[in-house]
Image (cartoon, grey):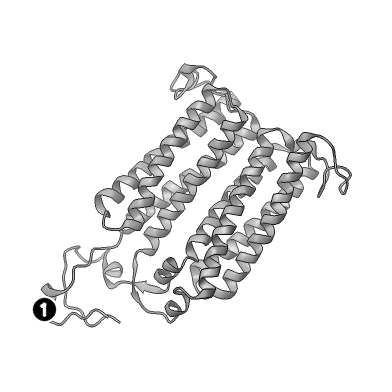
């Protein structure tokens, strides 16, 4: 309990302001741009446009050695991907600069904001290597994996920033979610679900990288629906389906447990419902994909929903951590609520905060 007596405001413990709304908007913009970058990268893969800007040294970071490339389909798709990469990079660097210069006192914001710049540098190098080595399957898969990690770290930053404005205890939920055995179990399950989703998405990328999508003409197995098909590519495809089966069970269990245990926390409830909806949509798209013989549009949607599912799984894993729940169960501080209307240096005597 912090008590500030009237007339003695100068003796109050200093409270550093939480992140401003503008910083939260910047972080969300960086995360959205990174998500779109991954989606367009998926379109590049499924349309075979990875070398749409050429395959020589002068073709990266330019496109056919030019700032404005020719307007053929493959070039436009690849150039759009590179343009989004530039936008996302600028936003990510801006997030890191603001975090380090204005919120260095908030370790939970500074650490992921700094880490995301490292991930960005790795992603740029992987992108260059992908073009220079003419799209080797292994590099393409590592490029996708690092992009997913980059998105996850941005979700981490967004969660830290948007929950940092909650500073005053208000709800009895706080006592129920802070560190009990049930909450610790759910926290571990959330991390397992996120890791499982990562493997699910990467296994799909492996199918695309190896061209194994065409090796199974039936569902749920490869042959006439319930028959196995031979060949190495069929095994890759079936392995992906096996991973999806296991992952579906894990995600359903975590979503249901989160709703039962923490359904009264709005952020957790919304994220768990979104996760379940994305999982159902992704499952349906996978069936449609096979039954319609892999049309490009459905393949693009499948990858887009897969990336969204990954982001939702990471967000839920972060939200069910005890330290995040403790902040979610608290109301925005008076400083945070009045921030848009009061000068930053305004000091007023306050009553006891409970």
Q: What residue appears at the point 58 percent right and 28 percent down from the top-left corner?
A: 50
Q: Is residue 78 above or below residue 310?
A: above
Q: Is residue 343 above or below residue 169?
A: above
- Judge whether residue 88 can be spotted in this image: no
**Residue 327, quarter of picture:** bottom left
Q: Position of residue 230 (x, y in %)?
A: 84, 37
Viewport quadrant of the N terminus? bottom left
Q: Is residue 201 above or below residue 261?
A: above
Relative to 188, is 48 on the left or the right? right
Relative to 287, is 28 on the left or the right? left
- Helix or strand or loop: what does disc 1 sit on? loop
In this view, the residue farthest toward the front is 181
Q: What residue appears at the point 53 percent right and 45 percent down from the top-left corner?
A: 148
Q: What residue appears at the point 43 percent right and 66 percent down from the top-left corner?
A: 324
Q: What residue appears at the point 67 percent right and 36 percent down from the top-left corner?
A: 208
Q: Position of residue 155 (x, y in %)?
A: 46, 53
Tell me the residue that label 1 is attached to. 8
* Dot 1 crowding, Cα within 10 Å, few <14, some 14–19, many 20+: few
Viewport quadrant of the C terminus? bottom left
How many numbered marks does the figure carry?
A: 1
Q: Nearer the viewer, residue 14 or 30?
A: 14
Q: Position of residue 60 (x, y in %)?
A: 46, 23
Q: Nearer the viewer, residue 45 or 228?
A: 228
């Amino acid at each position: 309990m912090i008590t500030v007596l009237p007339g003695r405001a100068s003796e109050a413990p200093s409270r550093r302001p939480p992140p401003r709304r503008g910083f939260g908007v910047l972080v969300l913009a960086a995360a959205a741009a990174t998500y779109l970058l991954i989606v367009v990268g998926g379109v590049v893969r499924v349309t075979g446009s990875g070398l749409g800007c050429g395959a020589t040294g002068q073709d990266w970071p330019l496109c056919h050695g030019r700032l404005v490339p020719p307007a053929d389909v493959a070039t436009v798709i690849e150039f759009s991907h590179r343009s989004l990469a530039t936008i996302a990079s600028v936003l990510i660097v801006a997030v890191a600069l603001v975090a380090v210069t204005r919120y260095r006192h908030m370790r939970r914001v500074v650490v992921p904001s700094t880490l995301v710049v490292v991930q960005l540098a790795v992603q740029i190098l992987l992108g260059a290597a992908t073009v220079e080595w003419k799209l080797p399957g292994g590099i393409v898969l590592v490029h996708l994996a690092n992009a997913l990690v980059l998105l996850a770290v941005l979700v981490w930053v967004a969660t830290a920033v948007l929950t940092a404005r909650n500073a005053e205890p208000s709800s009895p939920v706080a006592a129920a979610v802070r560190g009990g055995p049930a909450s610790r179990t759910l926290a571990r399950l959330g991390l397992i679900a996120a890791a499982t989703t990562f493997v699910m998405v990467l296994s799909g990328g492996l199918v695309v990288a190896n061209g194994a999508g065409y090796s199974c003409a039936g569902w749920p197995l490869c042959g006439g629906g319930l028959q196995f098909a031979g060949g190495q590519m069929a095994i890759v495809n079936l392995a992906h389906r096996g991973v999806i089966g296991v992952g579906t069970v894990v995600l359903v269990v975590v979503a249901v447990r989160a709703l039962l245990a923490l359904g009264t926390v709005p952020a957790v409830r919304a994220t768990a419902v979104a996760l379940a909806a994305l999982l159902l949509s992704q499952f349906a798209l996978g069936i449609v994909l096979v039954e319609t013989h892999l049309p490009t549009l459905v393949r693009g949607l499948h990858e887009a929903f897969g990336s969204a599912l990954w982001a939702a799984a990471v967000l839920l894993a972060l939200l069910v951590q005890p330290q995040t729940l403790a902040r979610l169960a608290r109301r925005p501080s008076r400083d945070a609520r009045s921030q848009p209307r009061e000068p930053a240096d305004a000091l007023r005597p306050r009553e006891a905060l409970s």
